[in-house]
Image (tube, rainbow, N blue to C red):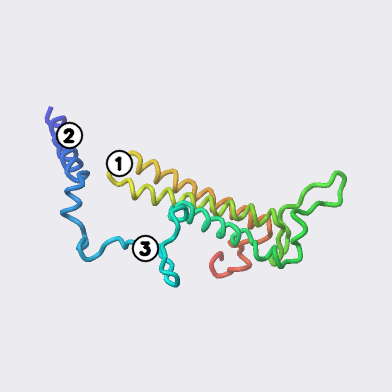
Amino acid sequence: MGKKDTVQKIKDIFKDTYTTVSKKSFWRKNLPWPEKLIRKPTIRLENPLIGKKVPNFLKSRYIILTLLYGVMFFFFSGGMYFLIGTYREIPMGYTQGDPPSPIIYLNQLNDQFIIEGLISAIFIFLGLAGFLLLYMSSKNFYKPTSSYIYLAFGVVIIIFSFFLLEIAMYQKGIYLYDDQLYPDVFS
């Protein structure tokens, strides 16, 4: 009987602490920084040369964010290299055997096919999606269940994209964990 009472008391203490900590008023009173001095900045979308505001259809953060992600995808996939590179007409290579099989990764460090750049950019954006889920978990601080779900999926996606990029680099012939590159570390 005594052990059950002790366990029940501990559960009650944790339950009371959890209900106190999960309230917004608790965190408003006990912030670790002065809220009046450090605030989230407001952004005014104006053109300083003209002095006019940005049109309403461009004010949406999602449109600007989508354009920014498109530009990032272009650069991460090697878009500038494809514009000026030697393999810009060749999206993917093929072997000379019968039947020909596709070559996705060119075994040279300084060259790549278009498909290789696109695959690498997709893996990088998959990792970015994992970091966005981590950010979402920090935004849902007052909803612990959804916060933990976002956190778990974010970490899994980040680790998954890291290993996909490692496999892609291994296929290309780049060995980051080679004992010949770092003899002091692996010996």
Kind of element beneath mark 3: loop
Given the image, on which type of amino acid does mark 2 rest? Val
> Disc 2 designates what residue?
7
Residue at left offset 65%, top offset 57%: 117
Q: CA distance from mark 1 to mark 3?
A: 31 Å
Residue 181 lies, in percent from the top left, at 61, 68
Q: CA distance from mark 1 to mark 2?
A: 26 Å
Q: CA distance from mark 3 to mark 2?
A: 55 Å
Residue at left offset 70%, top offset 61%: 112
Question: Which of the two labelled residues, at mark 1 and mark 2, occupies the earlier sequence position?
Answer: 2
Name the image quarter holding the N terminus: top left
Question: Which of the two labelled residues, at mark 1 and mark 3, occupies the earlier sequence position?
Answer: 3
Judged by depth in the image, the label closer to the viewer, 1 or 3, is: 3
Whether residue 31 sits left or right of residue 110 in the image: it is: left
Residue 77 lies, in percent from the top left, at 62, 58
Q: Which mark is residue 84?
A: none
Judged by depth in the image, the label closer to the viewer, 3 or 2, is: 3
Given the image, on which type of amino acid does mark 1 rest? Lys
Given the image, on which type of amino acid does mark 3 rest? Arg
Judged by depth in the image, the label closer to the viewer, 1 or 2, is: 1
Whether residue 133 sits left or right of residue 174 in the image: it is: left
| Residue positioned most to the bottom | 49
> Disc 3 designates what residue?
44
The local crowd at label 3, few if under 14, some if 14 to 19, many if 20 or more residues have their Cα within 10 Å, is few
Kind of element beneath mark 1: loop
> Disc 1 designates what residue?
143
| Residue positioned most to the top | 1
